[in-house]
Amino acid sequence: MSGAGDWLSARNVLCIRLDNLGDVLMTVPAMRALRHGRPDRRITLLASSSGIGAASLVPEIDAAIRYDAPWMKASTNDAYVHDLEMRETLAEGRFDAAVIFTVYSQSALPAALLAYLAGIPLRAAHCRENPYRLLTHWIRETEPAQWVRHEVERQLDLVMPLGAARLSSPSQLQIPAAARASVERRLDAHGVRPDEHLVVVHPGASAASRRYPVGRFASAVEQLVDRRNCRVVVTGSAAEGDIVDAICEHVSQPARVWGWAGKLALPEFAALIERADVLISNNTGPVHIASSLGTPVVDLYALTNPQHGPWNVPHRTLFHDVPCRFCYRSVCPEGHHRCLLGVPPEDVVAAASELLDGTPSVTGPPPLNSVVAGSVVGWHHMRREAA
């Protein structure tokens, strides 16, 4: 096994993160720590079509390579020739080292084999099985049997033995000035004044199990506009236009609520979240954009997994405890969605109001000991049962 000294000499480093946008964003602090450990280091991100957009917002990432790996759930890659071509691409990159970032339910071995075949001499990852020579730096997988860390901490723990240097402000996106200006023009067109509270509501998510019902989102928006007299932008992809429209059509003050489905490129979307006073969202990519920008979050947290909540930002994490917690399913296996249906819209409005008022709240990882809205069970207790 190679030591930190070997890694400190590694100037050209490949960071492999092959799942979704939010996962890449939660890995940014680790990539920044790698750069900070050696400021002249060049960082290249290998990411999926879903995650690669984050690279343009992270100044520590010098280059990005798109790769939809066949061993990842969302991949449509079914032609091995693409994988052979990727091996050639990585070999041509002459990387000194590769760090493979995974959640604990994923195996690092396919990516480790790819890096090995590309001739990358140093290779590090968490791994449950003995990787033998596929990894030169093997961090034994201990999750979820012993504990579950927040995803940001998991990836920081991976790189710290490699000579990385942790920063006091571990995550920050760089928003292009043109994106900020575009968002301001759009807000001006809706008559948004600088002294008005702006709330962004994001009702979509890739997995059905993580979606708070549209009707409840609509009720929360209606109550929030009535109570706080704020302005609300409802966002989503072009494919989520029906969801966005349904929420906007529900409210009785349409001048104060409007939808931007499929109208914002990622830099503009990030600029909008940066501009917002609060984000209300299912637990999906925008939550991690907000965490990277310091925007307070109301996170409607379906209990599909325990480690992906807001990080290092004021937030309220809302859920209802259920016996089937941490199912890791994209579709509710019980069919009842109680972990989200148990959260009334009034709780969403109360949580957003507290954050708009600047009420002190959690500024680190998701609350692991305390009772949170909609729950009577602390996270440590749930983690032990899940293990």
Image (tube, helix red, strand yellow):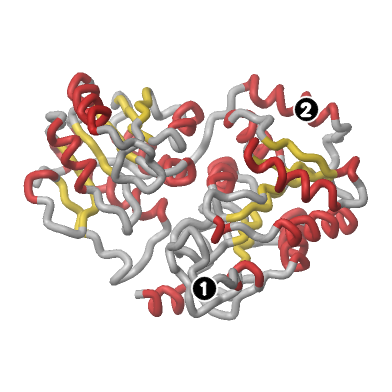
Mark 2 Cα-neighbour bin, 10 Å: few <14, some 14–19, many ≥20: few
State left or right for residue 73 relative to residue 234: left
State whether residue 216 is above or below residue 52.
below
Instruction: State the residue position of label 2.
Output: 186
Give the quarter of the image for residue 163: top left
- Kind of residue indicated by mark 2: Arg
For marks 1 and 2, the one nearer the N-term is 2
Residues at marks 1 and 2, CA–CA distance in whole angstroms: 42 Å
Q: Are marks 1 and 2 in contact (CB under 8 Å)?
A: no
Q: Secondary structure at mark 1?
A: loop
Residue 64 pos. (x, y %): 37, 26
Give the quarter of the image for residue 176: top right
State left or right for residue 90 relative to residue 356: left
Is residue 235 at least partly visible in the picture?
Answer: yes
Instruction: State the residue position of label 1.
Output: 334
Q: Residue at x 76, y 39 (%)?
A: 259
State left or right for residue 213 relative to residue 69: right
Q: Residue furthest front?
A: 79
In front of the other: 84 or 349:
84
State whether residue 140 is above or below residue 191.
below
- Kind of residue indicated by mark 1: Glu
Q: Secondary structure at mark 2?
A: helix
